[in-house]
Image (tube, helix red, strand yellow):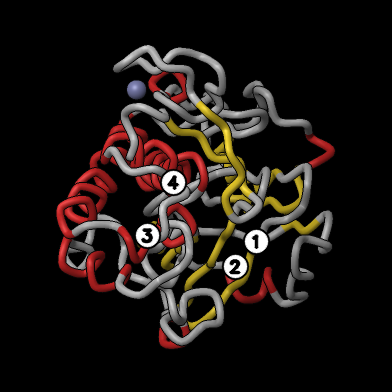
């Protein structure tokens, strides 16, 4: 499932290649995504230039001329790719090219999503902050508000596992399962520990490692498990750098102890029983 680093990697590529172009129309082949596509999608975006491409949590935000924002969520298996005619579509199965946005230079943005859990929704810029998707989201992990003091306060009195808290989008936006495991390994804190039992020093380490781990993953183009591909069809390379995620039974890269898999909040979670307290 694409997490923040995958969406941010995609955003950076699209910002370099598609920003400045004008959307000519929208060709919808399948309206049944996680929520049905609005029938006025083409009307809402046609003729509008893409001013910039932003991101909030795991939502891509294509800022269009005239105060319209096209919000795109990749769901479980979606990708937004920028393609040229005659070019190899790469690993994308054309049967899952559900929506296409032809651009004024003859290229097109293509939304491909085999499992159809994604979302594409045009809305006015003024409605964005109050939209059901973005309302109530916590700070971005790179924002100054997400710091040691903030996380320490957010953990006080909480009985949930610290990993579940770190994945709670109201606490911090965009940390998902893979990166929560990696962040807690770096911070030396077991994912199963009750959040309220995290010390001030540990909260500071978790807050510090969160943007570090995510930045490293963004630099590597994200992590590919199964279907994720960036907008050029390239897999992310961060999987090679994962220290605990998906490494159950294999030796810890720091101390050699066997990595353990446990379930936290119905999600598989990985930790080193020796390095993480
Ligand atoms: Zn270890």
- Characterize the local packing of mark 3: few (<14), some (14-19) or many (20 or more) Cα atoms within 10 angstroms: some
Q: Quadrant of the C terminus?
A: top left
Q: In front here: 156 or 104?
A: 156
Tag nearer the camera, 2 or 4: 4
The CA span between labels 4 and 3 is 31 Å
**Residue 46: image tag:** 2
Q: Earlier in the sequence, mark 2 or mark 3?
A: 2
Q: Position of residue 6 (x, y in %)?
A: 47, 41
Circles 1 and 2, Cβ within 8 Å, touching? The answer is yes
First of labels 4, 1 by sequence position? 1
Alpha carbon distance from label 2 to label 4: 47 Å
Above or below 211: residue 22: below
Q: Which one is in front in this view, the residue at disc 2 or the one at disc 3?
A: 3
Picture disc at residue 25? 1
Between discs 4 and 3, the one toward the N terminus: 3
The mark nearer the N terminus, 2 or 4, is 2
The part of the image, by quadrant, that contains residue 136 is: bottom left
Q: Is residue 193 above or below residue 196?
A: above
Residue picked out by circle 4: 191
Q: How many marks?
A: 4
* Residue that label 3 marks: 54
């Amino acid at each position: 499932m694409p997490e923040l680093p995958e969406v941010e990697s995609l955003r950076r590529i699209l910002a370099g290649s598609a920003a400045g172009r004008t959307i000519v129309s929208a060709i919808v082949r399948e309206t049944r995504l996680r929520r049905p596509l609005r029938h006025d999608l083409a009307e809402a975006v046609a003729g509008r230039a893409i001013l910039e491409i932003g991101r909030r949590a795991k939502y891509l935000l294509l800022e269009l001329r005239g105060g319209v924002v096209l919000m795109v969520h990749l769901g479980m298996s979606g990708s937004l790719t920028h393609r040229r005619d005659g070019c190899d579509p790469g690993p994308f199965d054309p049967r899952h090219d559900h929506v296409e946005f032809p651009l004024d230079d003859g290229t097109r943005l293509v939304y491909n999503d085999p499992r159809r859990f994604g979302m594409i929704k045009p809305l006015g810029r003024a409605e964005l902050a109050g939209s059901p998707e973005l309302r109530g989201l916590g700070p971005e992990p790179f924002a100054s508000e997400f710091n040691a003091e903030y996380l320490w306060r957010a953990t006080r009195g909480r009985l949930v596992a610290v990993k579940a808290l770190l994945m709670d989008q109201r606490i911090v936006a965009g940390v998902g399962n893979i990166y929560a495991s990696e962040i807690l390994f770096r911070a030396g804190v077991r994912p199963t520990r009750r959040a309220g039992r995290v010390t001030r020093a540990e909260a500071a380490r978790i807050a510090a490692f969160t943007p570090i781990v995510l930045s490293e993953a963004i630099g590597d183009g994200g992590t590919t498990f199964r279907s994720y591909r960036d907008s050029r069809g390239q897999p992310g390379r961060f999987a090679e750098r994962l220290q605990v995620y998906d490494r159950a039974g294999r030796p810890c890269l720091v101390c050699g102890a066997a990595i353990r898999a446990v379930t936290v909040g119905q999600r598989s979670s990985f930790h080193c029983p020796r390095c993480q307290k």
